[in-house]
Amino acid sequence: MTRDSVRLAGGRSGLGWTSRVAVAIVLAGTTAMATVGVAAAQTAPAHVSHSAKVVLQRHRAHFGKILVTPRAGMALYYMPHGTCTGSCLGVWPRLVMPRGKTVPKGASCLGTARFGRHHRLQVTYHGRRLYTFVSDTGHSVTGDGVGGFKVAKVVACTVMYRP
């Protein structure tokens, strides 16, 4: 509402002083609400990332460059034939995406595969599910060949990985 729109012809204001105060309060409240809305929009994240860094590439003696977990640096393994289920998972825990994240980062050729009735996502490398080995400690790589599992060596994406 502008100043000209509240004046009557002849220049006299059509509103009493109490009406003008009420209009001013309403206008001030609207401006304050708009300011709060703009401030809230500015503090909200512009882009929510669905990616998470779930692997690192590290060199390990006798194996060369392999995939490891970001925090503990534990070696990652895959099963060339089949998947690990049931009691196998007690020895070979899955590498699982954090909740709400769907895109694995840290190396090329990473993907995901659903598991369980809650449809959680397990990280894959070259289409094979990744696991850790409970007997590994620190930077050790002791699970290669155990129960048919192989250490996840870094190889080019264009090459179909055959151990």
Image (cartoon, rainbow, N blue to C red):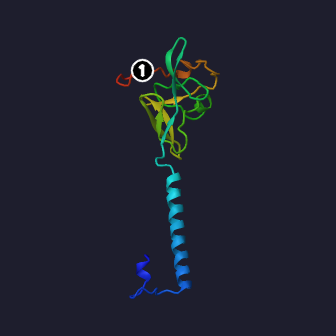
Query: Residue at label 1?
Result: 155
The picture places residue 158, in percent across and down from the top left corner, at 34, 24
Q: Nearer the viewer, residue 125 or 13?
A: 13
Kind of residue at badge 1: Val
Quarter holding the N terminus is bottom left
Query: For residue 10, which quarter of the picture?
Result: bottom left
Q: Nearer the viewer, residue 66 or 15?
A: 15
The picture places residue 104, in percent across and down from the top left corner, at 47, 35
Would residue 61 be found to the left or right of residue 14 on screen?
A: right
Query: Which residue is at a point 53% across and 52% down the rendered structure image?
Result: 43
Q: How many callouts does the rendering have?
A: 1
Would residue 159 be found to the left or right of residue 137 on screen?
A: left
Q: Crowding at label 1, few (<14), some or many (≥20) Cα neighbours within 10 Å? A: some
Query: Which residue is at a point 49% across and 56% down the rendered structure image?
Result: 41
Which residue of the protein is positioned furthest toward the top in this rendering?
A: 62
The picture places residue 21, in percent across and down from the top left corner, at 55, 79
Quarter holding the C terminus is top left
- Up/down of 107 relative to 18, above or below: above
- Up/down of 78 relative to 101, above or below: above
The picture places residue 131, in percent across and down from the top left corner, at 54, 29
Q: Kindly state the secondary structure of the residue where label 1 is placed.
A: loop
Q: Nearer the viewer, residue 15 or 28?
A: 15
Which residue of the protein is positioned furthest toward the left in this rendering?
A: 158
Query: Which residue is at a point 54% across and 36% down the rendered structure image?
Result: 96
Query: Which residue is at a point 55% across and 75% down the rendered structure image?
Result: 25
Would residue 81 be found to the left or right of residue 36 on screen?
A: left
